[in-house]
Image (cartoon, helix red, strand yellow):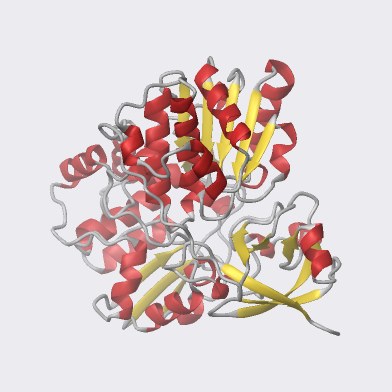
Amino acid sequence: ATLHSFSKLIRTTLGSNNIDFRTDYRMLPRTPQSPHEVLTSRPFTIADIDDSDVIVTFGTDLLKEHRNEYLRVRRAFNFNNSKIYVLNPYQVKAADVAVRELTYTAGCDETLINAICLAAMEDGLADGGDLKSKISPSTAAEAAQQCGVALDHVREVAQAIAGGRKITFIIGEIVNRSQERELISAALCNLNRLFGIEKRGQIAILGRYANSAGAAKLGLLPDPAPAVKSKLTELWGKWPEAEPLTADKMLVNMKKEEVNGGIILGDNPVMLYPDREFIRVSLEKLDFLVVADMFETETTALADVVLPLSTWAEYDGYYVNLEGRTQRANKALPPMFESRPGYAIVDAIAEQMGAPLFATDQARHDEIKQLLAIDSALPWPEGYLEVKPAPDAGGDEYPMALFIGDDPHHSGYVTEKANSLMNFVGEAYIEMSPSLARSHELSTGDSVRVESEVGKIIVPVKVSDTIRNDVVFIPRNFASTAVTSLLMRKRRVDRVKISKVER
């Protein structure tokens, strides 16, 4: 109800297409038909993991991002003897059931997918037609070398996918957060076409947070899927003529003072957007900013008006899970203090503007029901797509690739308000391999200065049980550690250097 009401307020009352729920991704696609949007829209069935004989996870720490699906993968391993392959730029605990874990060089995601395609064609496992002319490098051996993996392991994955009876291919946040998500997604579309994966199973980018699939199905994007846009136009009798701007483009225009007002509902982009200085400056340029949230945050500190938002436990609501299934959440307690549910805040704004959104609550739910019934899956691209990667420059001064994400006990920016979770992990840390720690004479608990081209922070060390290569991971869940101040919105691979802080 909140998402749909907010969408209707922006489109009909304000006449704008500047609405986007993807506020923690940089350099977003501008059209709904992009390869990335195709993969995020593909149908996915959780139960189909159970009897998949080949399961590939790519660009995801499944145990952190999708715990229930990780348990399904374990079940497939234990009861179906499934072959599981884990492909990431650093090692993850979820690979404990993998027959093979391929760790590729950071920034070489699409090169690895090209390598798998080339290996299949070279070994006669699939007929690629004109694919070879559209991708580079030209051989599987060269591609494998570029992304730092063994050719035999690439060929093993290709053989498994080609021979699989039923395949599940899961793509996650390492792809979503990449500046080159479109190029990686184009490579994955080629992979699907070459092997016919969806004809024998499923391949999809899985949304990270609860209701991200619901937001997409309801059209909370600057340019929604054509079927969704058509239905909304029919329901509302109009559609804004304004240019649709992604969250990233909105921020650019705010900085240029071409957008002068904003509403942020239940989000803290100053903490989560991968370039803290850029978004802070952009929001400060606004003439008027409204933020509705459950707690005071770095973003509410910049607002002209702050509206108290009820938590998910304080009102009845519905969520759409990653396979498109609608689920109900019942209210556990009444809204506290002066807070209101999101839809009530949106309704009140619309009424004050003299343009009520819905005659009744039932009218709102009827519109939502019609939208959720739409098959909004986008069609696969026609033919093979060009995927010719440009090698990442790297650098000696900042030698370590940095990845950020959620700590296993936390999610986003609100869980540090939960004392029970803070008892597990109460502060940010930098996780690194034992070999990297030894080379810098570091042990768990030592303080280190982490520096990038644009920022620096000080955090304690956590020597990893899983990471074995020279990358570092820092959780983004703690307000006191401005990890996104290390990042740049136009940088594909974020790189840092570390130094011990003597006590």
Q: Measuring from the top left, give residue 229's x and y in whole percent.
A: 22, 44
Looking at the figure, which quarter contains the C terminus?
bottom right
Q: Is residue 323 left or right of residue 226?
A: right
- Can residue 209 be seen here? no
Q: Is residue 73 left or right of residue 356?
A: right
Rendered residue at 31%/83% (across/down) = 287
Q: Nearer the viewer, residue 358 or 259?
A: 259
Q: Measuring from the top left, give residue 389's x and y in whole percent.
A: 41, 51
Q: Is residue 423 left or right of residue 113?
A: right
Rendered residue at 23%/57% (across/down) = 11
Quarter occupied by residue 251: bottom left
Q: Nearer the viewer, residue 122 or 82?
A: 122
Query: Would you place residue 424 above or below residue 382 in this image?
Result: below
Quarter occupied by residue 431: bottom right
Query: Would you place residue 350 above or below residue 174 in this image?
Result: below
Q: Nearer the viewer, residue 370 or 431?
A: 431
Q: Measuring from the top left, give residue 485's x and y in whole percent.
A: 55, 75
Rendered residue at 51%/55% (across/down) = 107
Give the number of callouts: 0
Q: Nearer the viewer, residue 107 or 396?
A: 396
Q: Measuring from the top left, give residue 278's x and y in whole percent.
A: 43, 77
Query: Would you place residue 112 above or below residue 122 in this image?
Result: below
- Can residue 344 be seen here? yes
